[in-house]
């Protein structure tokens, strides 16, 4: 019959098939290609790591209350991948303060990382660093009581926020 | 007649009659409308996916313990006279209760569903002979929250266990417990 018409229809069919396949592939890539924001977990892990460094078995580890070598004593490093300028701008920040539980006097304080991240703590927004603050109670060997406050902040916006 | 019209390389379509022409136009219009409908459906689907992709939820950490809160708990029990008083009094009362409240009140924000420290009594009831397994109510943290929380989900109510739970043996019949429930 009209084979010429059939050939034209075939080309059209392949074009439509390709269009539908491309649209489905695009939808899948958009939906599953977006990042998951794991910074909440990361800040929690950093806080737990610091807490574990400061207190073991319910007692304060006074040897680790060293402001200059705190990160090395706690075996923490803030190394990141060399992308999006992360190496130049630190992606982590922490702040630790140890106070007397009874009268609140400051016993020890230290911080490290990119201090600019602290400015975003308390603010809400999708493309802002994630902050996490926790405090806990501990003793030293002489049964003196302390309150330890840990603030952790993680940026890494490019990889966690779409 | 059609054989004469066929060429080997190029097809030449001749409109030999008005009917043939109308059929061709009619079929072409059908395919054009179908194409527009297909493209419209694809565009709407892509648009919907883009909206839902932006609302993708975060990662929920299904933790079963809270290292920081547990440090507070252990330090609380190690504090001078706390352990002795708990063993003697058998419940969280007096200075122990006030002290515990000072330490753990700041965790209430993170655990809005329930925060409880108290004594679990698992002694044998003298009259019935049945093993008790109940948290003793205290003036500082109230009643021990229920072990299961009902959450409406797929298939009905979903029951969840405690989020954070620590227990330390006080004596043969009693334990001191920390219970924290998030959501």
Image: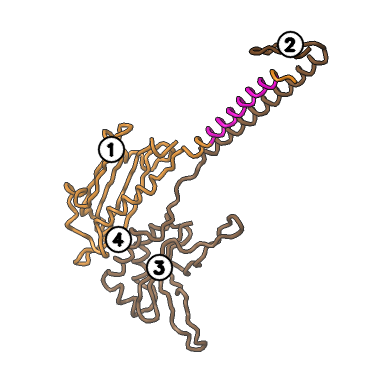
**Label 4 and label 1 in one chain:** yes
Image mark for residue B5: 2
Describe the element under mark 2 as helix, strand or loop: helix
**Label 3 and label 4 in one chain:** no
- Pinpoint residue B136: horizontal percent, then vertical percent: 45, 74
Q: CA distance from mark 4 to mark 1?
A: 30 Å
Please report the bounds of the magenta region as a residue range: A5-27
Q: Earlier in the sequence, mark 4 or mark 1?
A: 1
User: Magenta span has A9?
Assistant: yes
Q: CA distance from mark 2 to mark 1?
A: 76 Å
- Pinpoint residue B158: horizontal percent, then vertical percent: 56, 60
- In the rendered picture, chain A carries what hue? orange
User: Where does label 1 land, which residue?
Assistant: A90
Q: CA distance from mark 2 to mark 3?
A: 95 Å
Q: Earlier in the sequence, mark 2 or mark 3?
A: 2
**Horizontal side, residue A58 vs residue A12: left or right:** left
Q: Which chain is brown?
A: B
User: Where does label 3 land, which residue?
Assistant: B117
Chain of residue at mark 1: A
Residues at discs 4 and 1 in contact (Cβ within 8 Å):
no
Q: Residue furthest bottom?
A: B127
Image point 34% across, 66% down: which residue? B99
Q: CA distance from mark 1 to mark 3?
A: 40 Å
């Amino acid at each position: 019959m009209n084979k010429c018409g059939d050939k034209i229809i075939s080309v059209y069919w392949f074009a439509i098939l390709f269009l539908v396949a491309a649209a489905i592939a695009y939808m899948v890539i958009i939906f599953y290609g977006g990042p998951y924001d794991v910074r909440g977990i990361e800040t929690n892990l950093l806080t737990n790591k610091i807490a574990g460094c400061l207190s073991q078995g319910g007692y304060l580890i006074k040897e680790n209350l060293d402001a200059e070598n705190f990160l090395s004593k706690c075996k923490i490093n803030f190394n990141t991948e060399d992308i999006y300028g992360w190496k130049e701008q630190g992606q982590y920040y922490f702040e630790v303060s140890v106070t007397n539980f009874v009268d609140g006097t400051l016993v020890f304080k230290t911080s490290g990382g990119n201090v600019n991240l602290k400015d975003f703590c308390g603010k809400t927004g999708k493309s802002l660093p994630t902050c996490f603050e926790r405090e806990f109670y501990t003793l030293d060997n002489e049964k003196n009581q302390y309150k330890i406050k840990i603030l952790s902040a993680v940026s890494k916006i490019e990889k966690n926020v779409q | 007649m059609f054989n004469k019209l066929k060429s080997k390389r190029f097809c030449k379509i001749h409109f030999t009659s008005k009917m043939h022409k109308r059929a061709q136009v009619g079929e072409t219009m059908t395919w054009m409308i179908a194409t527009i409908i297909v493209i419209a459906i694809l565009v709407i689907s892509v648009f919907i996916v883009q909206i839902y992709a932006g609302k993708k939820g975060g990662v929920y950490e299904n933790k079963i313990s809270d290292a920081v809160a547990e440090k507070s708990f252990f330090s609380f029990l190690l504090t001078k006279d706390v352990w002795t008083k708990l063993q003697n009094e058998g419940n969280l009362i007096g200075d122990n209760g006030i002290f515990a409240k000072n330490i753990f009140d700041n965790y209430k924000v993170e655990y809005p569903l329930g925060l409880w420290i108290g004594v679990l009594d698992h002694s044998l009831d003298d009259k019935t002979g049945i093993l008790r397994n109940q948290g003793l109510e205290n003036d500082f943290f109230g009643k021990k929250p229920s072990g299961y929380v009902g959450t409406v989900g797929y298939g009905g109510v979903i029951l969840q266990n405690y989020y954070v739970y620590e227990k330390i043996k006080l004596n043969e019949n009693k334990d001191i417990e920390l219970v924290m429930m998030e959501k």
